[in-house]
Image: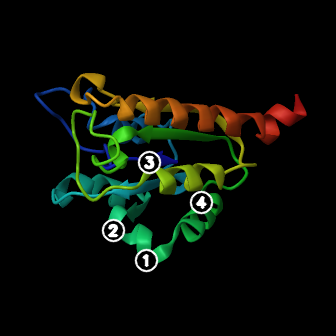
Amino acid sequence: IHIDAHCDTSGLFDMTKFHHGGPFRNAVLDGVLDPSRTIQIGIRGSAEYLWEFTYESGMTVVHAEEVTGLGIPAIIEKARKIVGDGPTYISFDVDSIDPAFAPGTGTPEVGGLTTREVLELLRGLKGLNIVGGDVVEVAPQYDSTTNTAHVGAQVLFEILSLMVFSPAIKKG
């Protein structure tokens, strides 16, 4: 489950495949990420050519502008259906959140998720087989309010809390 403003599936950048805009492409090409079990939530921006690999590989995308119409419960249901019972990793990029709530990131995109939507979404994933997660692109130097750092810490806490309820943990 990838929550981000960007698909992060672009090709070479500055003549290298290793950059912050391409890890999910690399993971699919390296055979360590199943695109049919991948959902990307909160995607937005006008550079749709960067998303071509996402669609061609079979990933599911929920654009940020679809969130209000679909509603968080429907997105939770869709995510649950896509990942199923298998091991699930949550990758959270803080730029998925609208910069009004979390400006401290290197690649802000207006029109993002609210902190309330993110918390509802994450808490709705309770019981999935969450085996790990990350919070990326928090850049405190771009946020004098410290809101972004607080958001990042809360999201990481939520992901760790979800892992406690993972079937893998319960089985021992």
Mark 2 lies on a secondary structure that is: helix
- Against 125, residue 17 (above or below) is above
Callout 3, which amino acid?
Ile
Q: What type is the residue that disc 2 sits on?
A: Glu
Q: Which residue is mark 1?
A: 69
Which is more toward the observer, 59 or 145?
A: 145
Q: How far apart are the alpha carbons under marks 2 and 3?
A: 14 Å
Using the rendered view, name the quadrant where residue 20 is placed. Answer: top left
Q: Are marks 1 and 2 in contact (CB under 8 Å)?
A: yes
Mark pair 1, 2: CA separation: 8 Å
Give the residue number, with chain letter if any, for mark 2: 65
Q: Secondary structure at mark 3?
A: strand
Mark 4 lies on a secondary structure that is helix
Mark 3 = which residue? 3
Which dot, 3 or 4, sits closer to the camera? 3
Return the residue at label 4: 82
Residue 71 location in percent, x, y?
51, 71
Q: Report how far apart the C-alphas of labels 1 and 3 lie in the structure.
A: 18 Å
Mark 2 nearby-residue class (10 Å; few <14, some 14–19, many ≥20) = some
User: What is the spatial separation of the Cα atoms under label 2 and label 4, in whole angstroms?
Assistant: 20 Å
Mark with earlier residue (1, 4): 1
